[in-house]
Image (cartoon, rainbow, N blue to C red):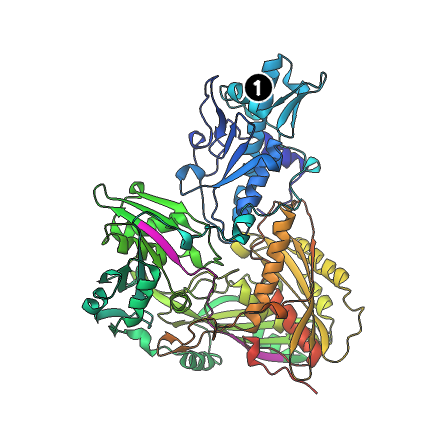
Amino acid sequence: MNAPLSPSRRRFLGTSAVGTGALVIGMSPAGVLAAPGTASATAFTPNVFITIDRKGIVTLVSKQPEIGQGIKTSLPMVIAEELEIDWKDVRIVQGDLNPAYGSQGAGGSTSTPTNYENFHRLGATARTVLVQAAAQTWKVPVAECSAAHGAVVHGPTKRKLGYGALVPLAATLPVPDAAQVQLKDPASYKLLGTRIGGVDNAAIVSGKPLFGIDIQLPGMLYAVYAKCPVFGGKPVSANLDAIKAMPGVKDAFIIEGTENLNGLRPGVAIVATSTWAAFKARRALEVKWDEGMGAGHSWADFAAQAAAAAGKPGTTTLRKDGDVAAAFAGAAKRVEASYVYPFISHASMEPQNCTAWFKPADGTLELWAPTQNPGAGQALVTTTFGIPKEKITLYIIRSGGGFGRRLSSDFIVEAAAIAQKVNAPVKLTWTREDDLQHDHFRPGGFHHLRGGIDANGKLVGWHNHFVTFANRVEREGKSILQPGSGGSLSGDEFPGRWLTNCLLEQTALECRIPMGPWRAPGSSVFSWVFHSFIDELAHAGGRDPIAFRLELLGDKDIMPGSGERGQPYSVSRMRNVLKEVAEKSGWGKKKFAKGQGAGVAFHFSHRGYVAEVAEVTVSKEGQLRVDRVVVVTDIGAQIVNLSGAENQVQGSVIDGLSTLMHPELNIEGGRVVQSNFHDYNLLRMPDTPAKIDIHFLKTDYPVTGLGEPVLPPLAPAVCNAIFAATGKRVRELPLSKTDLSWS
């Protein structure tokens, strides 16, 4: 639960579980703890994550996929801190998919909170063994010894032994029991909270091969995979003989695929001796498609259906408290507005790719995949082809961006399908057009909102009819509509639980469009809708936007209900970040000229509490410039890597602004109209905020992730600032659809 960490609880976490069967990260102690070695050991490996050699060099395994969030650096820092090793003596290796490592997914900002406490224990346990080895060597009490800078020091005599010298003896010692292992006092941290550059930074800036798209194997072939441009369609026939006759082409064939929109979709594979030969053959490919029911989809039709649903009850009631009709009837002011946002793509820099090598002699399959969810990729291959998990080896390769896209495994199962027809390793590479038009998209949505304000400017009624998108799926023998990831509204979403009179409804429009998690699923759009409309209500009631929000939050410490991701909602933490952002931004103390203004928003997402103030300038011609964004976030008791944390905040602000301003996907005839970055625009450097002020509130709560919670409040803060500057409300995304000019 989201409860504070008391000093006693910190000590308990440091002294319990070790050696009792609970020193685990999702596996048995045998998977974590190495068996005692011998006196001639050349390395000390107290668990599967730590190896120390005779030179004192420490090699740490980073088990989570690295997608640019910095986890390959930050989690090993936790072990290094407890191990008392200098960072210069640490080497990091990427751990491939291995049950011994426990959970290895990277999504939902879960990597840090899932592993933080366990990694402290791992490092502390190894340090304890090394201290015991030194004490035995000197024949002194353990209490007289301590570790620092990769060595153990005997306090009374100042004798010192480096970790390397202790390896042979340490490798023979048993795992210490719970009472012998103590976590460090956070006040003594030397590494955590400092700025450490990413372990791959030098390789990235020098262009060294790191990513899935860089994989090279002897005798490797190269593949592309063409799918029906209409979602849910399948190939009937293709000019395969002509394609096979092209230079460099080794084979071309149809893959039947499955009905699963998020699995192996039907298509045509081309295998060649180079990527360029495969791409050239792809351009010559002629396919007759069975387009299926998806051919009738269009955004215009979806919008018409949503408009028709606005005046009707939703198909699902998510929350119904009080008497909403009476509240509106008695309100001094009533405000109505509709908010609309489109489908968008993840648009990660590196298109989807996977290298696969199937060996029919023994039925084994090797996969090299830039994936956020390696376990799910392995499982999808198993369920699709019947290859046992034990025969699948998956190497986790650094991803050139993910944002949730690589939680899906369609590109992995496609490569596996092609590899089983090719007697060689084969690398599947999607084109940019494939990546944009066959994404698992963030679902679009329509919110029809009503709010009632009493004579004192207090919110007394709230009604939201959310029209979303859903795929038809089979569950337990029943056909149901399943809203896309981030396309289902919770009845506990702010401000629902906070109001006496509240009605939340949802209507799902059936579609064949594949949908998947997009950075801060749901929160990335719900925050824009709710805090933009809350701002409308604050102004309608003649209230200061921050005071209005503080009144809405109330003064309860913990808000009851399931909360986001099963977490209770700490009102006090949100009030604190909101008050702090007001102070840090100078809210209400600045005088803005016409065309300038400030806006505020907050959001609880992925265990993080974040409030933001945006300051903007809008020219008379409607050109927007974001002058400053002030961010205050509470993500718990410790910032692991200050450099990485600042990077995540800055990236979230820029990504949030980009998504607000530019991208949208038009659907016509069941197809995505946009095809590449020339018609799917993203933010450019000159348009990024001139200044991003970052403030972390360190609180006595468990450490949480930071890859997602900062993004949601950005869009409403900017849109509310635009209103303050121009008097114009932004109710449709992207922002480019709204004329911001003023006179």
As displayed, is residue 282 above or below residue 223?
A: below
Q: Quadrant of the C terminus?
A: bottom right
Q: Is residue 546 covered in magenta?
A: no
Dot 1 amino acid type: Ala
Asked where in the image residue 514 lies, by quadrant, the reply is: bottom left
| Residue farthest to the top, as pictured | 139
Work out whether residue 133 or residue 287 is closer to the camera in this orientation and state it: 287
> Could you tell me which secondary element the residue under label 1 belongs to?
helix
Residues drawn in magenta: 335-356
Residue at 36% over, 54% down: 354
In the displayed structure image, the side of residue 736 where residue 94 appears, left or right:
left
Residue at 78% over, 64% down: 586
Percent x, y of residue 461? 61, 72
Residue at 62% over, 31% down: 84
Percent x, y of residue 25? 48, 38
Work out whether residue 581 or residue 267 is closer to the camera in this orientation and state it: 267
In the displayed structure image, the side of residue 361 where residue 302 appears, left or right:
right
As displayed, is residue 364 above or below residue 205?
A: above
Percent x, y of residue 336? 59, 79
Percent x, y of residue 310? 49, 79
Work out whether residue 474 or residue 365 is closer to the camera in this orientation and state it: 365
| Residue farthest to the left, as pictured | 241
Viewer can see residue 134 = yes
In the displayed structure image, the side of residue 182 where residue 389 appears, left or right:
left
Q: Which residue in the structure is indicated by mark 1?
A: 133
| Residue farthest to the bottom, as pictured | 743
Viewer can see residue 496 = no
